[in-house]
Amino acid sequence: MPALDPAWLVDGPDGNATIVLCHGAGAPMDSPFLATMARGLAGRGLRVVRFELPYMRARRERGERKPPDRPAVLEQAWREVIAALGGGGEVVIGGKSLGGRIASMVADECGARGLVCLGYPFHPPDSPERLRTAHLRELRTPALVVQGTRDPFGSPEEIAGYELSPAIRFLFLADGDHSFKPRKSSGRSEKQNLEEAIAAIAEFVAELP
């Protein structure tokens, strides 16, 4: 593997398939959610690299509390990380919410092996008409979207009505919210949903050419 940025977090064995994960809009790369996903995937033999987008890195390094950068900046950050890791053919890319959305916007261009979106923000909560799906209609990169069935950013019923590429497959986690957490009354646990997601991602990556 090429030399890694020392600011990145790396889990799992070197020399195996690499999946690059980026954080959501408000939580950093070492959030409990992404840390759990990284450790779980590493435990299944994957090399997991986590990085932060410019605004989040500035928050960590200088204490600056800024909103996410404009899409062009976020997309360029993804391109640079992919290039630093040897190019799209060497990596599966994705992440939580915003991180996965931006990855999906550069996946075809960069020739990524695969794409994994953890809670894709299909629309803002309470604004189902503001869809973020235009680029997903023609997506060529094999993709797995893991979505809770109670996700306010896109429910299974809503998603069923979208025009999406056949390259995209879905895993819906029972009663999960945007971070896959179910209600106690559901009989499911957060641990169960996270483990199901990790197993599905590992299987997806293993099946990629």
Image (spheres, grey):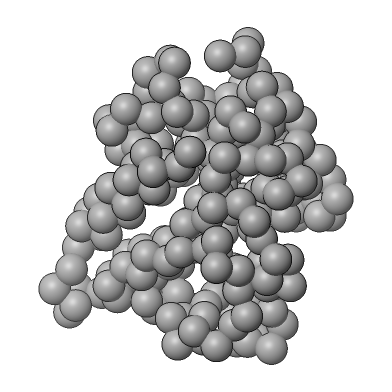
Residue placed at 52% from the left, 80% from the top? 159
Q: Position of residue 24 (x, y in %)?
A: 58, 53
Q: Is residue 30 left or right of residue 13?
A: right
Placement of 64 over or under 126, stated as above or below: above
Q: Position of residue 31 (x, y in %)?
A: 46, 43
Q: Quadrant of residue 193?
A: bottom left
Residue placed at 65% from the left, 18% from the top? 5
Q: Position of residue 15 (x, y in %)?
A: 44, 16
Q: Quadrant of residue 58?
A: top right
Depth order, front residue of 197/63: 197
Depth order, front residue of 102/24: 102
Placement of 169 over or under 4, stated as above or below: below
Q: Residue furthest front?
A: 209
Residue placed at 76% from the left, 37% from the top? 79
Depth order, front residue of 97/19: 19
Residue 39 shows in the view: no
Q: Quadrant of the N terminus?
A: top right
Residue placed at 55% from the left, 61% from the top? 167
Q: Is residue 193 left or right of residue 206?
A: left
